[in-house]
Image (cartoon, rainbow, N blue to C red):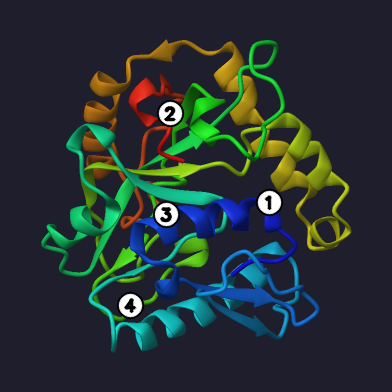
Amino acid sequence: MVRNDAFFLRKWTAYYGAQLGEENLYVYLDGKDQPLPDWCPKAHIIPCDRVCGQVVRADKGRIRFLSARAAELLESYDLVIGTDADEILAVDPKLGVGLREFLSGLDIRSSVSGLGIDVGQILGEEGDITPDRPFLSQRSTGQVSTRYTKASVLARPLRWGSGFHRVKGHNFHIAKDLYLFHFGYFDMRRIEMRFSDKDRMEAGWEKHLHRRSETIRNCTEGRKRDWDRTVRWTRVAEQVLRPPYAWNKPGLLEMKVIVRIPDRFRETV
């Protein structure tokens, strides 16, 4: 579900359309005042009544709606993927398989997650993002993030928690070689633009946006670790460590783990 975010929606529809077939994409517009995108003619674009309210309340309303839509789609599909428009679920290119083939080869009983990578920016080295080039050809670092290790893929009707962060009443499984890249805060100029978005400010996003810019500071200033070694131990750590307030969410003890994204991902997204 998306509102006023054509920048990311273009990338989302292009990526998932190539991976899964554009005719299998379902985009719900948060508000019937939203313009219909003209760049994905085969996708299902459904204008909806706007989900109003402050951030937390609105998120709960949206995820109830999307969980119900996923349940309906699972009557026709084997799996349903739910993500925000700025999130790309990708398979490690070293395997040489696409998302459809990879997920079809897994034994998914309820849900599956990709390891969350919050893509950042190295200030002073990496400039403003250019939308007509692959994102990962312009960004080289990310923070391993429990926040974006989401229960994105459902194999049966279940209830997502707000933002797809968990599946209520069920454990999670992080698949090896599967990653959820989050691009929402990978460009300082775009963060500053979001501060000027009236809809977001009225919904209480100011504190949230300021906090998210920390990823850029961490990627600029922090130690950059080797990808392959680091994703191995953080995947295990996230499955073992759990926050005390939610046993079915991953934990990492507030560690700030920055990784260099390998060149093999450069053309992925």
Identify the residue position indicated by label 2 in the image: 266
The quadrant where residue 192 appears:
top right
Secondary structure of the residue carrying numbered label 2: loop
Please tell me how crowded label 3 is: few (under 14), some (14-19), or many (20+) other residues with Cα within 10 Å: few
Identify the residue position indicated by label 3 in the image: 245
Q: Is residue 137 above or below residue 17?
A: above
Q: Residue at x 23, y 76 (%)?
A: 78
Residue type at the position of mark 1: Phe
Mark 2 vs mark 3, foreground winner is 2
Mark 1 vs mark 4, foreground winner is 1
Residue type at the position of mark 4: Leu
Residue type at the position of mark 2: Arg
Q: How many marks?
A: 4
Q: Where does the image place residue 14, in percent across and percent down from the top left?
A: 51, 55
Please tell me how crowded label 4 is: few (under 14), some (14-19), or many (20+) other residues with Cα within 10 Å: some
Which of pointers 4 and 2 lies earlier in the amino acid sequence? 4
Q: Where does the image place residue 111, in percent across and percent down from the top left?
A: 26, 64
